[in-house]
Amino acid sequence: MHVVIMGCGRVGSALARSLEKLGHDVAVIDRDPAAFRRLSAEFGGRKVTGIGFDRDTLIEAGIDKADAFAAVSSGDNSNIIAARVARETFGVDNVVARIYDANRAAVYQKLGIPTVATVRWTADQVIRRLIPEGLLSEWRDPSGKVVLAEVALSPDWVGTRITALEEATGARVALLTRLGDGMLPNTTTLFQEGDLAHFALEWNRLDAVTAICAAGPKPGSD
């Protein structure tokens, strides 16, 4: 793949290095030529100095043959404009924009521009490290209505079918982490000691689901 990245800050430079290590062809755009010092000396991709949403700059970076475009500069407006130009003018299918304002990220997501809401993601990651038990939000859709969350289970659930927990909570167990490995459960899966359950559910039901998981199964549950 040929990937164009707008922004050579910490995120952009790390993204460029990672993609190149995976064998992809990478071009990085930044208005400040000094920013390219963040790239390793071994970086073999293209370095383009210019405005990331300028047509000539994008063409110099190879946007006309790009398979993907990432706008990860420090400016929300610049990232959105560049992402829309890449998508609407040059027809790049795989486009993503980094957005600090979560509310704006939700709006642009609905307009068809995949976004990463930096502040919300960072806050969720910090919470994951502050709270050792209970609810850990791992992913949230841009609207904030649906989350993927790790919920602590009472030991009383051990030996119970996953379907019993789903029936009790009204939420979907999207995956389990067992002995450090992820697995997709099925209707015959039983919870084992040490399992971590990751639920897909509506944000406004988190407290109820957390309480049910902590209480354990009701008598007679399978």
Image (tube, rainbow, N blue to C red):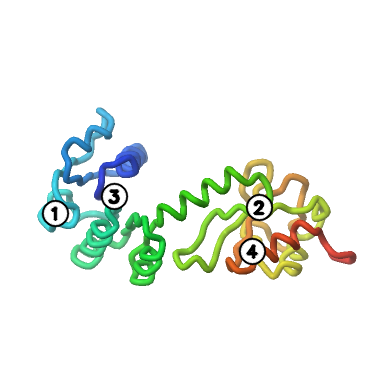
Label located before the other in sequence (1 or 2): 1
State whether residue 80 is above or below residue 154: below
State which mark lies toward you, 2 or 4.
4
Q: Which residue is mark 3?
A: 74
Q: Which residue is mark 4?
A: 206
- The CA span between labels 4 and 3 is 33 Å
Q: Which residue is nearer to you in this view: 151 or 122?
A: 122
Q: Position of residue 15 (x, y in %)?
A: 34, 43
Q: Position of residue 44 (x, y in %)?
A: 23, 35
Amino acid beneath label 3 = Ser
Label located before the other in sequence (1 or 4): 1
Q: Which residue is mark 1?
A: 59
- The CA span between labels 1 and 2 is 45 Å
Residue 35: which quarter of the image? top left
Amino acid beneath label 1 = Ile
Disc 1 secondary structure class: helix
Amino acid beneath label 2 = Leu
Is 203 placed left or right of 5 in the picture? right
Q: Residue at x 52, y 46 (%)?
A: 126
Q: Which residue is nearer to you in this view: 17 or 156?
A: 156
Label located before the other in sequence (4 or 3): 3
Disc 2 secondary structure class: strand
Q: Which mark is residue 176?
A: 2
Disc 4 secondary structure class: helix
